[in-house]
Image: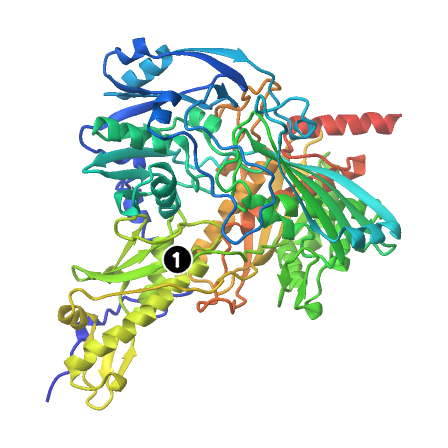
Amino acid sequence: MNQPRGEQEQDPSRTTELIGQSVRRLEDDRFLRGHGRFLDDLDLPDVLHGVVLRSPHGHARLTGLDLEVVRAMPGVRLVLSYSDLREAGLSKVPLDIPPPGEPVPHAHCAEQPILADGFVRFVGDTVAFVVAETLVQARDAAEAIVADYDILPAIVDPTEALSDQVLAWSGSATNVVFDHHEGDADAVDAAFATADRVIELDVVSNRIDALPLETRACVGAFAGGDFTLYVSTQRVHILQRALADRVFKVGRERMRVVAPDTGGGFGQKNGLYPEYVLCLEAARRLGRAVKWVAERSEALQSDCHGRDNVFTIAAAVDAGARIRAIRATRLMNIGAYTAPRAIVPVLNGLTHLTGVYAIPAAHARVQGVLTNTACTSPFRGAGRPENVQCCERLIDVIARDYNLDPIDVRRRNLIALAAQPCVSPLGTTFERADFAAKLDDALACIDHAGFAARRKQARKRGRLRGLGVALYAEDLHGSHEPIPVHLRHRGGKLAVMVGSGSAGHGHETSFLQIASQCLGLPLARLAFVQSDTAQIPDGVGTAASWSLTLGGSSVHVASARAVEAAKSIAARLLDCGSSDVAFSDGLFRASVTNRVVGWSEIFEAEPEFAVSASFDGSGQGLPIGCHACEVEVDPDTGDVTIVAFGVAQDAGRIINPMLVTGQLHGGVAQGIGQAWSERIAYASDGQLMSGSLMDYGVARAADLPTIGTRLSQQWDDSNPLGVKGIGESAATGSSPAFVNAALDALAPLGVRHLDMPLTPEKVFAAIRTAEICMQK
């Protein structure tokens, strides 16, 4: 009798139900052993080094640029200026505005020159590019360039920019890039006319830097008429399209873009930057690879920053402290140029202005202005955190005005579960979203029941205690492209090749967990490939929390397709029809003979085994959550200490709880950093005041509390895995929860509002001002 085949496929150490397990990150073994391969680790033969000469002025006319002496300096191989690029047909960084299928809320765009076109418009603007044999030689040469400038008036404040009295672009007609309206202005006017009270608040969402551990970097190479760009990015395919189609105008097959291990991105590394074009053009001219790596101070100058919005929001409130309408203006500081994807925070943020509250009417006006500062672009949350910050602060101010508990005011205004499905006045669809439960869970995380006693004890010690919460719903719907997945047999392993791109997200672990469970293959029999357009010709990279919902679903669909393809092969091996083959736990069994084969036999019979698939649905549900924060303020120093922090999050079906918790912790850290200490600051002449980590107050591990989490798993019907994207959620809720807690502590002194960041100096000044007012 024939013995069953394929027993070697059974691995008793493999967990058959990997989805839902906290599998340790597969990536971390090589990282911890020093085997990670980040951009600066690339050691291409005969590589040259590039350095960018940057503008020292916020706004100036470039009247002279002496490069001849520099070209003769030791080791210098190339010096590029704007005129050199213009002769080659290269001039500006192409924009991807408007995004496909989305409205166009802008009047005009200000494209960024790859090198200064006669003007510099922010400190850090690109002026010239020097390539030399060594990095030291390139730096020496860049420092030796003589550049002459006529300094022009600069504008850095978006509110002042709106007046057009000082223009960020000399000779332009206006600083206004776009002026967009959304909502029902008539319904809002009617609600305000009959309101019990109209409560207004100004809120600033401060400018910050994403500060990825790995700064932006790239290596450009050119050989045989083909370009290769190695780059620290989240979106190799988007860069390939822009560089091939719109910059160098070559076929995409001639433009390979590769991202090795990428040390963080947070949206900052999504777009095309001038340095990528410069390295590729230098490599084409010299026939040698050219590397550029930003120093941290250079990155703080030239990276796209995040946030930098000014809100004025007003609520029409009835006698029961229920909001009947909201009217808001949002002023966005675009920076000196309209960066790629700069419009995204506008489109994302509008629907979040009314938050999770049953507000019948809303109207918003959003304007974007140019200033002589670095460009802004999407940063973790991309418009949602700014609007949630505004809405959640307004709820607390309403509560103070009505002398009510802010938590009670939230409960009065929350969208009830029984009222769903429903659509907000600005377009968010709510369905099965239990906000009251999330509020309860977050409060339980920090022992809300014992807060009154803790506050009383703090007062005895001369300290001020406060508690704050923030609720949110992340509306992730939009016109997203599918993320293709290819499964290919390679040397005894099945390669899972995905069109997304991890920048520390843990894709290798979570995607392989999905494939392992679907295919019945141990993790050790799977390989992970990403972020190389030569191996994966189609994809969109990672942004907007879509990697798991779209990419993970594509892995699921491709795995199912692989099983069906393998059944046909198994049928030949088992001498039966495909319909007689059953698949379970990695084995293909003939139903009549009970003979089995495993994946090893499938791959042996079909060495070139390969399938491809993508999930074509919208793939994006509505992750919801609530953050609760308790702080203690030292009135003698203004220092705000976080005592407790809790996160209640609906994460959909959870693939890996450890990764979910890590994403939440990281988002909380970034949100608290913005609220507590981080701020990119410019002087009135455009000089950057926070140009190093000595001046930029990034939150560190020692500054953060233990974070309590309560996860729930409400299946999302929009994708086959039932998952939701939560990578940005924690950055949305943490800032307003912290600010609300701090201002709750200061409320007895009469402090109504403070804008972020709540540094000790700012808090101390507010306390002293309040004490003086109370004495009068």
Residue nearer the viewer, 627 or 361: 361
Q: Which residue is mark 1?
A: 483
Q: Residue at x 15, y 78 (%)?
A: 5
Q: Is residue 167 above or below residue 358?
A: above
Q: Residue at x 30, y 41 (%)?
A: 250
Q: Is residue 204 above or below residue 692?
A: below
In the image, residue 333 lies at what x, y percent? 60, 33
Residue 767 in sight here = yes
Residue nearer the viewer, 485 or 548: 485
Q: Residue at x 85, y 29 (%)?
A: 774
Residue nearer the viewer, 636 or 431: 431
> Dividing the picture into quarters, in which one does residue 495 lie?
bottom left
Residue 678 in sight here = no
Figure colour scheme: rainbow
> Dividing the picture into quarters, in which one does residue 179 lie?
top right
In the image, residue 535 lies at what x, y percent? 26, 52
Relative horizontal placement of residue 154, taking residue 364 as reference (left or right): left
- Mark 1 lies on a secondary structure that is loop
Image quarter (top left, top right, bottom left or bottom right) of the C terminus: top right
Q: Is residue 417 above or below residue 203?
A: below
